[in-house]
Amino acid sequence: MAQLNRRIGPRAGELPAGEAEPLAEEGARRAGGIARRADGTARTTVILAMLGAFVIFLDATAVNVALPSMGHTLGGSTAGLQWAVDGYTLPLAALLISAGAVSDRAGAKRVLGWGVAAFAVASAACGLAPTLGALIAARVVQGGAAAAIMPSSLALVRQAYADPARRARAVAAWVSGGAAALAAGPVIGGALTSAAGWRVIFFVNVPVGLAALMLLARTPASPRRAAPLDPAGQVTAIVALAALAFGIIEGGASGFGRPVVAVSLALAVAGFAGFAVAEAKVAHPMVPPRILRLRTVVACLSIGFAFNAAFYGIAFVLTLYFQRELGEPPVIAGLMFLPMTALLTVANQAAAPVAARFGHQAPVRIGLLVSGLAMLALAFLRAEPLVALDLIPVGTGLGFALPSLTFIMLEAIPAEQAGMAGGLLNACRQAGGAVGVALYGALVSGTSLAAFESGMRTSMLIAAALLLAAAVTALTALRPVRPPRARLVSPRSRA
């Protein structure tokens, strides 16, 4: 038999001696090359997503420091400068919930490309704006583009890694990109404004956008699915938030007794009522009404609103105080925020072991209590060094609370609706920031130093009350939860 085998050669499916091992080695090399290319593509995707998160949050904080310079160049009042901020945050808040559905429907890669391109063009328009009105219009486009970038960039991160552990690390990197931008924004904004003028803050987004589009070309295509949209809910949300911000800003600037202010606030009430009716009646609501009947979800949303109302509103007021009232240059004003923002990422990381040992409710309660008490003390401080030192526990407490707050929100809702849950929480946070800037800006709109300081103290007391009320909410309403097994949809959507 051995002689017969030698005469007729190897059996079917076998290779002659000496040929199998080289082919096996070649297959291993090819497999290794494919794996390395896949890892390289995934890393490119994460870098791209981090760039997207970085520019979104950088613009949210860097522009604040440049506001007095903008007002000096373009002749804007305090109300106009409020719109330079809220023109960005309002469309971001209003469009964020449904942007995830658009990303799923059109594909995350395509929507991210649209968002990055629109953001870069709008940034150039901001830098070239000849008037404050043109700047605000370009900021509105920026905010809409940011709403497209945020969920689509995170969706690409989830798409890049099949392994849950590696995907979790990639999501953490995406979050750290946003936290780093929040920390660096005031310093970068102040340095650029002092060195080259406020317009440069917007121009730097253009090369970043081009780099992101180049990286996007190396990213795999994204799947699409027939995600339902909710035009009625989207329109009513935009009307409600815009009318509310307009009413508060104009009321603070020219008096709340004016008819246009009363009409605007009435329109805001009608918009919110219309949103509630639309969500109860449409087949596929942006926010299923049953979700808003969950105690934990309502608590998380109210805490998120208070969180940003305090953080962004007080940052706006202090920026004006440092530069307009104390005469500090933009770079010094930016450095004044550094103690608060630099520890945000440190506090994010420090919350993890505490949450692992005592539960995620503990960091939320501790962080909000510390921030609220520090904000209360801030209302009675005026010396610049003391203000900067007191901002440390304000920022550290908020940074300590945020990761666990996000986790609790996602835990309360089925995993299949995690995108909607994250979008809803971030939308409430951005809405809180917009309302905070509108409200506190209205309080400090007085022309004299005494009127400004009185309004600033009132703003800080309101911010402290919001944070302490949020701490009480976290203490009484946040409990360990299990996500419901059934999908949280309206009865009509099951029909």
Image: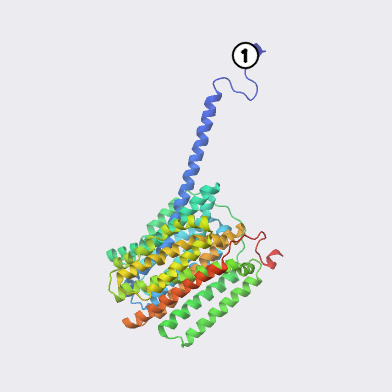
Would residue 100 be seen by someone viewing this image from the given angle? no
Q: Quadrant of residue 186?
A: bottom left
336, 93: nearer the viewer: 336
Residue 427 visible in the displayed image: yes
Instruction: Check disc 1 and report its element: helix, strand or loop.
Output: helix
Q: What residue sits 51% from the left and 30% below the top?
A: 26
In the figure, residue 374 lies in which quadrant?
bottom left
Q: Position of residue 261 (x, y in %)?
A: 48, 84
Query: Which residue corresponds to the image point at 57% horizontal and 19% vertical from the top-left?
Result: 17
Asked which colour scheme the image uses, the reply is: rainbow
Up-down relation of residue 366 to residue 269 (above or below): above
Q: How many marks?
A: 1
Q: Is residue 386 above or below residue 348?
A: below
In the rendered image, which residue does mark 1 sit on? 6
The quadrant the C terminus occupies is: bottom right
Q: Residues within 10 Å of mark 1 (few under 14, many from 20)?
A: few
Looking at numbered disc 1 in the image, what kind of residue is underneath it?
A: Arg
